[in-house]
Amino acid sequence: MKKQDIKKDPIRDRIINLIIDVGNNKKKYFNYFIFISVFL
């Protein structure tokens, strides 16, 4: 059941992968955030 639920919910999977990616690359995302903030 749980394995099927994961396959039916790719959006949640992408969000989890994004959170993991942010966790692994905080410095990179922080730099992007500053870059965007400067131009807003």
Image (cartoon, rainbow, N blue to C red):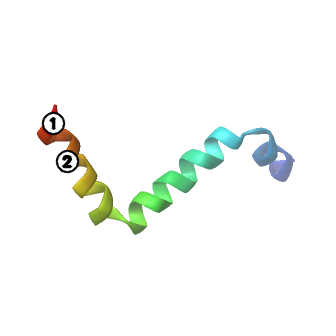
Work out which residue is located at the far left of the displayed protein and give it.
38
Q: Is residue 16 left or right of residue 10?
A: left
Q: Looking at the picture, which amino acid does disc 2 mark? A: Phe
Locate residue 18, reporting x and y percent.
50, 52
Q: Is residue 36 left or right of residue 8?
A: left
Locate residue 36, reporting x and y percent.
22, 41
Name the residue: 19% across, 48% down: 35
Mark number, residue 8 = none
17 vs 3, nearest the viewer: 17
Work out which residue is located at the far bottom of the displayed protein and give it.
24
Where is mark 1, residue-wise? 39
Q: Looking at the picture, which amino acid does disc 1 mark? A: Phe
Label 1 residue SS: helix
Q: Is residue 31 above or below residue 7?
A: below
The reply to whether the C-beta atoms of the residues labelled 2 and 1 are less than 8 Å apart is yes
Locate residue 34, reporting x and y percent.
17, 49
28 vs 10, nearest the viewer: 28
Name the residue: 64% across, 39% down: 11
Where is mark 2, residue-wise? 35
In the rendered image, the quadrant that contains the C terminus is top left
Label 2 residue SS: helix
Q: Is residue 25 above or below residue 40?
A: below
Q: Is residue 11 left or right of residue 26?
A: right
Work out which residue is located at the far front of the displayed protein and give it.
39
